[in-house]
C-alpha cells in the first residue's frame, strides 16, 4: 500500500511537470489564454519548488499584462513573493505587486504636464519627462507663462514593497504596498519624521486631464506641521493631483493637464 502511494505521488509529479512544460510552450508562443489555464492546472497539483514559483509569476504576469486583471494577478504575485527559498521569483513577485495596478509608472519616454489648479496653468506649468537607467529619472522645468523659472529633477525606484522618490540626498517612501485604505508608515525625510497614510483606495478624481477612478489618496504629514499634503495616484497614470490639507479641508495645488505614457 505504501508502494502504491509512492507510485501515485511520482505519477502526479510527472504529470505536473508535463503541465508546466506545456504552459511554458503556450506562454512563449503567445497563446496567453491557453497558457494561463495550463499554469493554473499545474499550480493545483504542484509541490513547492522552483517550478511552482516560476509558474506563479508567469501566470500572474499574464493576468496582469495580457488581460489587465489585477484582481487575479495579485494573489499569485503575493504567493510568489512569500517563497523566499526561491529569491529570483520572490523578487519578481514583489515587483509585480507594485505594478498591478501601476499607480506610479516608470516608463522611459513618459511625459506629464501639470498646472496650478487655481488658474489651470496661467500662473504655473510643470513639464516632466521620464527616462530609465539604474533608477528612473524625472527631469523637467517649471514655467510661468512661457518663461522657464526653475528646473525640476527627481529619481524613482521600486523596491522593498515601496515606491521611493529621491530629491538629491533625500529620499521619501511615497507609496507602500499593500495599496489599501488604512495602510500607514513613517519615515525620516530631509531630517523630519513624516507619517504617510492611504486614506482612500478607490477614489474618483477629476482634473484637467480627465476623470479617473480607482485612485489612491495618500496623506503625508510632517511631524509638528499644521498642514499636510494629499497626493492622488491613479492606475496606469501616476500622480494626478496634489492638494494641501488643513483642519478646514483641502486647498487645490497642482493637477495633471496632459500625459503621454510612451515606452522608448
Image (cartoon, rainbow, N blue to C red):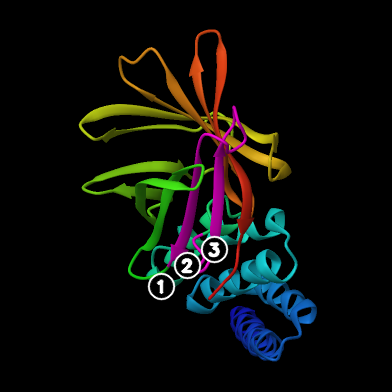
Distance from disc 3 to disc 2, alpha carbons, whole Å, reads: 23 Å
Residue position marked by numbered label 2 in the rendering: 92
Vertical position of residue 148 compared to residue 66: above or below: above
Q: Which mark is residue 159?
A: none
Q: Kindly state the secondary structure of the residue where label 3 is placed.
A: loop
Residue that lies at the very extreme toward the front in this rendered image:
146
Q: Are marks 3 and 1 in contact (CB under 8 Å)?
A: no
Closer to the camera in the image, 199 or 253: 253
The reply to whether residue 97 is visible in this rendering is no
Check contact, mark 2 vs mark 1: CB within 8 A: yes
Task: Reply above or below: 111 against 250.
Answer: below
Residue 110 numbered mark, or none: 3
Q: CA distance from mark 2 to mark 1?
A: 6 Å
Q: Quadrant of the N terminus?
A: bottom right
Give the labeled residue for mark 1: 88
- Whether 102 is among the magenta residues is no
Q: Residue at x 60, y 43 (%)?
A: 256
> Which span is picked out in magenta?
106-131
Q: Residue at x 73, y 80 (%)?
A: 35
**Residue nearer the viewer, 3 or 250:** 250
Helix, strand or loop for disc 1: helix
Q: Give the class, few, some or many, for how many residues have Cα within 10 Å of label 2's Cα (few <14, many ≥20).
A: some
How many neighbours does mark 1 have within 10 angstroms: few (below 14), some (14-19), or many (20 or more)?
some
Report, in whole angstroms, how far the alpha carbon at label 3 lies from the one at label 1: 28 Å
Which residue is at a point 68% across and 40% down the rendered structure image?
Answer: 208
Q: Residues within 10 Å of mark 3 (few under 14, many from 20)?
A: some
Q: Going by the image, does 110 lie left or right of 35?
A: left
Residue 4: x and y in percent read: 65, 83
Name the spot of residue 128 as percent of width and height, x first: 47, 54
Q: Are marks 3 and 2 in contact (CB under 8 Å)?
A: no
Residue visible at 41% across and 72% down in the picture? 88
Amino acid at each position: 500500500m505504501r508502494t502504491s502511494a509512492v507510485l501515485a505521488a511520482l505519477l502526479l509529479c510527472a504529470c505536473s511537470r508535463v503541465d508546466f512544460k506545456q504552459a511554458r510552450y503556450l506562454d512563449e508562443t503567445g497563446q496567453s489564454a491557453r497558457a494561463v489555464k495550463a499554469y493554473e492546472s499545474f499550480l493545483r497539483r504542484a509541490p513547492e519548488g522552483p517550478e511552482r514559483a516560476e509558474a506563479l509569476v508567469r501566470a500572474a504576469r499574464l493576468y496582469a499584462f495580457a488581460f489587465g486583471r489585477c484582481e487575479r494577478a495579485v494573489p499569485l504575485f503575493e504567493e510568489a513573493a512569500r517563497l523566499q527559498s526561491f529569491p529570483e521569483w520572490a523578487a519578481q513577485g514583489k515587483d509585480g505587486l507594485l505594478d498591478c495596478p501601476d499607480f506610479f509608472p516608470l516608463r522611459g519616454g513618459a511625459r506629464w504636464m501639470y498646472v496650478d489648479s487655481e488658474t489651470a496653468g496661467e500662473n504655473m506649468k510643470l513639464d516632466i519627462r521620464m527616462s530609465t537607467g539604474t533608477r528612473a529619472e524625472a527631469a523637467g522645468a517649471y514655467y510661468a507663462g512661457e518663461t522657464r523659472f526653475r528646473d525640476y529633477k527627481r529619481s524613482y525606484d521600486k523596491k522593498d514593497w515601496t515606491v521611493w522618490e529621491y530629491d538629491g540626498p533625500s529620499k521619501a517612501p511615497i507609496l507602500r504596498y499593500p495599496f489599501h485604505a488604512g495602510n500607514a508608515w513613517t519615515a525620516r525625510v530631509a531630517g523630519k519624521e513624516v507619517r504617510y497614510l492611504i486614506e482612500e483606495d478607490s477614489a474618483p478624481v477629476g482634473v484637467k486631464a480627465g476623470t479617473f477612478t480607482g485612485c489612491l489618496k495618500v496623506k503625508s504629514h510632517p511631524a509638528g506641521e499644521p498642514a499636510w499634503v494629499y497626493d492622488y495616484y491613479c492606475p496606469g497614470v501616476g500622480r494626478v493631483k496634489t492638494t494641501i490639507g488643513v483642519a478646514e479641508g483641502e486647498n487645490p495645488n497642482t493637477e495633471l493637464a496632459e500625459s503621454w505614457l510612451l515606452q522608448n
